[in-house]
Amino acid sequence: MQGKVALVTGAGSAEGIGFATARLLFEAGASLVLTSTTNRIFDRQRALDDSGERCLAHVADLTDADQVEELVQRAMQQFGRIDILINNAGMTQTGVDTPLPELFHKLPFLQWQREFDLNLNTCFHVTRAVVPHMLQSGYGRIVNIASVTGPLVTFPGTAGYSAAKSGMVGLTRAVAHEVAGQGVTVNAVAPGWIATHSSQPEEIAAGLHTPVGRPGTPEEIARVVVFLASEGCSYLTGQMLVVDGGNSLQEIKG
């Protein structure tokens, strides 16, 4: 990763997948652009690089295309390039109440639309803004953090989230096909039950019933992401790698 510049979205939580990925990329030599919706992103920047020479923090609402463009422009002004994009933003937005899950036939359209804004449109806006710079330089690695929920499994009350994450995998494949042969790869990672600061007790309990016998950690997801973002991972594109402790293999979950 020496000399590479990575943009990581949704990196505000110190215990989340985004920051775990950013930390591994930084340790591997990459310079970073970190973003989240609140000022806590500056705490993440200071934890990695108090000087700010190799790490830029920027507050942005990635559902807003104008704010995304401002983010990308700042990144280009400071570093002159974006080699790696990790689309991790989604699921929830700090400071905004999360509505209670609703069955599909009771789901208000605005709630459905919000799921797409958070979990698919954020990826759309940032990827669309970054890809032209990658194509111009002839190099890029894009990794989208999807989920097993939607592409492989689901449960009641997650119609919007499931559809959006399935859409992210479809977007991954479409963009990968369009930029193949131009030095840019696009892949997705689909985490299963991962223990983070925002995990609910029932989610931790579900992780105990995986074949591995525990929830995964953000760093375990991050290591797969960094593999996909590496220069040597040049012939793998348009794929979804499932990281769920084998949970999607079993029909009966204890």
Image (tube, rainbow, N blue to C red):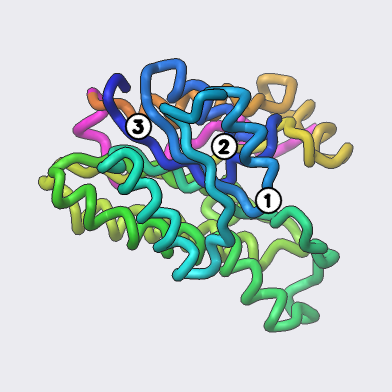
Kind of residue sitting beneath label 2: Gly
Q: Rounded to the nearest whole Å, what is the CA distance between mark 2 and mark 1? A: 14 Å
- Dot 2 falls on a residue whose secondary structure is helix
Instruction: Look at the image and give the residue range highlighted in magenta.
Output: 232-254
Q: Is residue 130 visible?
A: yes
Image x and y of residue 186, in percent: 31, 46
Residue 234 is one of the magenta-drawn residues: yes
Binning the other alpha carbons within 10 Å of mark 1 as few (below 14), some (14 to 19) or many (20 upward) gives: some
Kind of residue sitting beneath label 3: Ala
Q: Nearer the viewer, mark 2 or mark 1?
A: 1
Residue 244 is one of the magenta-drawn residues: yes
Q: Nearer the viewer, mark 3 or mark 1?
A: 1
Identify the residue position indicated by label 2 in the image. Answer: 18
Task: Identify which residue, 114 or 242, lies in the foreground.
Answer: 114
Identify the residue position indicated by label 1 in the image. Answer: 38
Farthest right residue? 201
The quadrant in which residue 250 appears is top right
Give the mark, 2 or 1, whose residue is nearer the N terminus: 2
